[in-house]
Image (cartoon, rainbow, N blue to C red):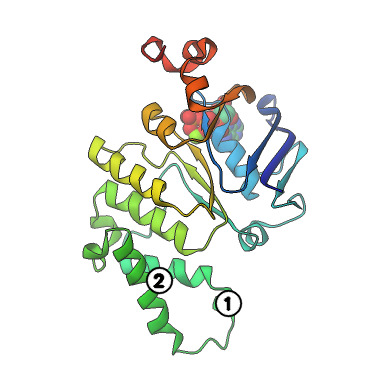
């Protein structure tokens, strides 16, 4: 069974067709990178998968479940996780509090009214473990607004993992980062368990091609080409559309 199956998906904003008859599958455990110029429809695709936007037609299946009638919360319960193109942290919360919030969200009992106060140390311990595991425990007590931009993006990845996703959608996790910060984010994604399927939108070509098992290239809402990183590197259409000449 595929982790994700997108069938003949179309979404229009009025007269603009942002996603146009798009079909593809993502295998369980796969790292699939989506390339495409600005406005190609990449973020719109993520918004449809997560349920923020309803498609005009077509279907999306997550681990075999048709998502059409499911709220975003139900999709999350099926294992869908996401990070956004711009940071979405609460500025005055510390890194630890943010991680605790994500750990709680990943625990199925978190909404129970009777959740006992004893669970607090457990959540705190788990959040500290995660921060330690991903190299930012030194910033545990720092408000997120005082973290460097790279640390904020790292924390967002940790929070996405804390929620226990089976399919993780990452929208340009390295956008705006320095070379060193990009390398950190790349090494984090490389370390993700293969139990997590990853769909990654990324403009940093070198990083994306190192991480990808397979690449899809979109333009004007359509799938232009898909293939292995080697195939994408040497595809003249891709070079023309997107990468400039230095890639071929
Ligand atoms: N809320 C909206 N209303 C109308 N048009 C929109 C809306 N959101 C996006 N669009 C348009 O839909 C198209 C696809 O946008 P989208 O944000 O999905 O592109 P993208 O591939 O993520 O681009 P980028 O690389 O710049 O992030 C663009 O032409 C954009 O202007
Ligand atoms: Mg986008």
Query: Which one is nearer the viewer's eye here, 108 or 227?
Result: 227
Classify 10 Å Cα crowding around label 2: few (below 14), some (14-19), many (20 and above). Answer: many
Query: Which one is nearer the viewer's eye here, 183 or 155?
Result: 183
In percent of width and height, residue 236 lies at 51, 10
Mark 1, secondary structure of its residue:
helix
Residue sitting at 54 percent across and 58 percent down?
165
- Asked whether the viewer can see residue 7, the reply is yes
Please determine whether, in this image, residue 147 is positioned above or below residue 225: below
In percent of width and height, residue 6 lies at 70, 38
Q: Quadrant of the C terminus?
A: top left
What residue would you read off at disc 1?
111
Please determine whether, in this image, residue 223 is positioned above or below residue 165: above
Residue sitting at 23 percent across and 56 percent down?
146
Q: How many marks?
A: 2
Asked if residue 36 lies left or right of residue 28, the reply is: left
Residue sitting at 25 percent across and 35 percent down?
179
Classify 10 Å Cα crowding around label 1: few (below 14), some (14-19), many (20 and above). Answer: few
What residue would you read off at disc 2?
100
In percent of width and height, residue 152 lies at 32, 52
Please determine whether, in this image, residue 235 is positioned above or below residue 112: above
In percent of width and height, residue 16 lies at 66, 25
């Amino acid at each position: 069974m595929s982790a994700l199956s997108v069938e003949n998906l179309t979404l229009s904003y009025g007269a603009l067709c942002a996603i146009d008859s798009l079909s593809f599958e993502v295998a369980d455990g796969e790292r699939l990178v989506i390339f495409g110029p600005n406005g190609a429809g990449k973020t719109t695709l993520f918004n449809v998968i997560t349920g923020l936007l309803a498609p005009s037609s077509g279907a999306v299946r997550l681990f075999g479940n048709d998502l059409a009638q499911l709220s975003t919360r139900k999709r999350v319960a099926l294992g869908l996780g996401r990070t956004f193109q711009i940071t979405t942290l609460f500025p005055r919360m510390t890194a630890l509090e943010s991680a605790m919030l994500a750990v709680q969200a990943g625990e199925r009992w978190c909404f129970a009214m009777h959740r006992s106060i004893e669970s607090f140390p457990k959540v705190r311990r788990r959040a500290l473990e995660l921060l330690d595991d991903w190299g930012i425990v030194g910033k545990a007590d720092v408000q997120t607004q005082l973290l460097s931009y790279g640390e904020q993006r790292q924390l967002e990845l940790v929070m996405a993992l804390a929620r226990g996703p089976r399919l993780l959608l990452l929208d340009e996790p390295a956008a705006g980062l320095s070379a060193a910060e990009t390398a950190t984010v790349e090494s984090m994604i490389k370390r993700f368990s293969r139990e997590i399927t990853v769909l990654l939108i990324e403009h940093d070509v070198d990083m994306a091609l190192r991480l990808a098992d397979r690449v899809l290239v979109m333009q004007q809402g359509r799938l232009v080409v898909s293939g292995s990183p080697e195939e994408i590197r040497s595809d003249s259409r891709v070079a023309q559309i997107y990468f400039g000449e230095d890639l071929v």
